[in-house]
Amino acid sequence: MVAVTDATVRQTAAQRSTPQKGRSPRRRMLVLNLVSVAIGILLWWALSASGLRLPSPAEVAVRGWELLVDGTLLSDTAASLTRVLIGFALGTLVAIPVGFLMGWYAWARGLIEPWVQFFRTIPPLAMIPLALVLLGIGEEPKIFVIFLAAFFACVISTFQGVVNMDRTLINAARVLGTKDAGIFLRVVVPASVPFILVGMRVGLGAAWATLVAAELIAAQAGLGYRMQNAQLYYDLPTIFVGLITIGILGLLMDRVLLFAEHKLTGWQERR
Amino acid sequence: MTATTQLADARISVRHVRKTFDLKGEEFVALGDVSLDVADNEFVTVVGPSGCGKSTLMNILAGLDMPSSGEALVDGDAVTGPGPERGVIFQQYALFPWLTVRKNVEFGLKTAGLNAKDRREKAEHFIDMVGLGQFADALPKMLSGGMKQRCAIARAYAVNPSILLMDEPFGALDALTRVKLQEQLLDTWSRDKRTVVFITHDVDEAVYLANRVVVMAARPGRIFEIVDVDLPYPRTEEMRLSPEFAALRNRVWNAVYHQNP
Ligand SMILES: Nc1ncnc2c1ncn2[C@@H]1O[C@H](COP(=O)(O)OP(=O)(O)O)[C@@H](O)[C@H]1O
Ligand SMILES: [Mg+2]
C-alpha cells in the first residue's frame, strides 16, 4: 500500500508540472486497486463455497453488522484505539527527546545506547509476562508493552536523524552566528523531522501489532479480546470481523501519518 | 618552498599554521606550515590539486576548525570560532532545505536579533540583488544550482560581513552560470569592497578574479607559489582573451599541475 501511495504522490507532482497529461494514470491505478479487492473477495467466497471451513463474506458482513448495531464493535474499537494511542503517544513523547539526546551528546549516546540496543532485540510481547507480574492485569501492562513497541521504533529513528544530518547545515548556521541552542532548535530539529515521522509510522505499526496480542491477556474489551473470546466458541465470523477491523484501522492510522509526513517533509529533495 | 608575504596592515594573517588529522592512529598532515597575509579589500584566490588542504585552510579561517599549531588572525585577533565579520559560502550551498529563499536569507538576521519587519526588508534587498526576487517564497528544491548559490550568497551578504570566505562556490555549476556569477561577484566586490578569500580548482577562475593567486601543493598541504595578477579592475571579457591573461594562466597552470614534489 505504501508503494502505491508513493507512486500516487509522484503522479500528483507530475500532474502539477504538466497539467494536460490529466489524471488518467491515477484513476487507472485506483481501478486496478478496486479490481484487485473484488477478485480477492470473490476468491474468498469461492473458497468458502467449496467446503473449506471458512465463513463466507456474507456471513462476515452480517456478523459485522450485528456487532456494529449492538455496540460491541464500537466499544471494542474504542478500547483498542485508546490503548494504542496512549501507549503510542507516551512512547513517541519519550523517544523523541531521548533520540535527540543520544544524537546530540556523545556522552548520552554512550550511556543510553547499550540499553536501547539490548532491549530493542526483545520483542515487546516477550515483556508481557513480566509486565503482568509487575503491573497487574489492568490497563497498565497492555499500555506498557505498546509503549515499548512505539518507543524503540521511534528512538532509533530520531537518533539516526540527528546523527546523519548534513554537518554543513550546522556549519552554515554557525558561521551566521547561531549558537548551540539556536542550532539545535532551528537546524537539528527541523532536519530530523522526516526521520522522526518515519519512526512514528514504524512505531505505530509496531504498537498496533503488539496490541492484539496484549489484549489476549485478561482484557474485558478490545478487538483482541473479542477474537480471543470468539475462538472459544469457534465463532469464525467474529474473528474475521476483528481481523478486518484491525487491518482497516491500522491502514487508516498509517495514512494519517503518511499525510502528515507529506505535509511536513515536502521540502525534501526527491531523487 | 614556502612562500610568505608579511603585510603591515593585514586583515587576515595565517601564521605557521599546521593541521594534522588522526588517520587510524597515524598522523596525517593536511597543512604543513602555511603562512599568508591578506590585505584589506584584497581578492585572493587559492588553487591547488584536490586534497592539498584548501578546505582545511578555509575552515580554520572560518573558525569551524582549529589549527594544530600556529594561528590564524583576523584584524589582529586569533580566530577561535566563527565571527560576524566573516561570511562563508560553501560549495554545497548549504541552504536550509525546509526554509524558503526568504527565510534562508533571514536566518542570520534572526540570529542577530532583528525584528521581523527589518529582517524582511533587508532580506528583500539582498534577494533582489542576486536576482531571486521572483523566487523569494520558493523552497531550495525548486531552484537550480546557480540559483541556490545566489541564495547562499544573499544569505551571507545579509549579515554584512567585511570578509568573504568562499570554498569552491561555483565548482558545481555549469560554465555559463559560473561566468555570470563571477561577474556578479566582482561587481559587488568592486562596489562595496570586501576582503575575499576564494577557493577554486579552476585556474581560469582563479586568475580572472584575483589580485593574487595562491597556489597550494599537497602532501603536506602548503603554499607552493603566489602569483600577483597585475590586471586592472574591472576585469572584462577582452581581458580574459588577452595575452597577458594567457601568460598568467599558464604560469598558474604550471604551478598547479607541474609541481615538483
Ligand atoms: N576531518 C578530517 N579527518 C581526516 N582527514 C581529513 C579531514 N578533513 C580533511 N582531511 C584530509 O586532509 C586533506 C585535505 O583536505 P581538504 O582541505 O578538504 O582538501 P581540498 O579542499 O584542498 O581538496 C585530504 O587528504 C583530506 O582527506
Ligand atoms: Mg575542498
Image (cartoon, rainbow, N blue to C red):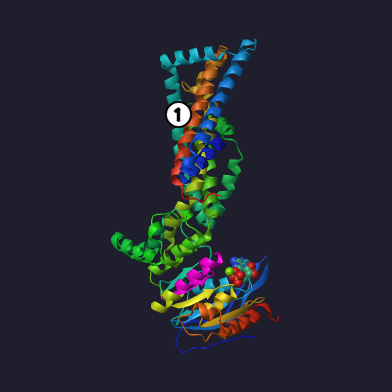
Q: In this view, does A238 lie above or below B55?
A: above
- Magenta-colored stretch includes residue B19: no
Chain letter for mark 1, please.
Answer: A
The image quarter in which residue B253 lies: bottom right
The residue sitting at 59% across, 86% down in the picture is: B3
Image quadrant, ligand 2: bottom right
Residue B97, image x, y percentages: 47, 55
Point out the stretch of residues depicted in magenta. B162-185
Which three-letter amino acid code belongs to the residue tagged 1?
A: Leu
Foreground residue, A112 or A182? A182
Foreground residue, A228 or B123? B123
Q: Quadrant of the N terminus of chain B?
A: bottom right
Residue A127, image x, y percentages: 57, 34
* Neighbours of disc 1 within 10 Å: few (<14), some (14-19), many (20+): some
Count of numbered badges drawn on the protein: 1
Foreground residue, A214 or B19? B19
- Magenta-colored stretch includes residue B175: yes
The image quarter in which residue B11 lies: bottom left
Left/right placement of residue B247 relative to residue A215 reads: right
**Which residue is under mark 1?**
A81
Q: Quadrant of the C terminus of chain B?
A: bottom right
The residue sitting at 43% across, 67% down in the picture is: B156
Residue A68, image x, y percentages: 43, 17
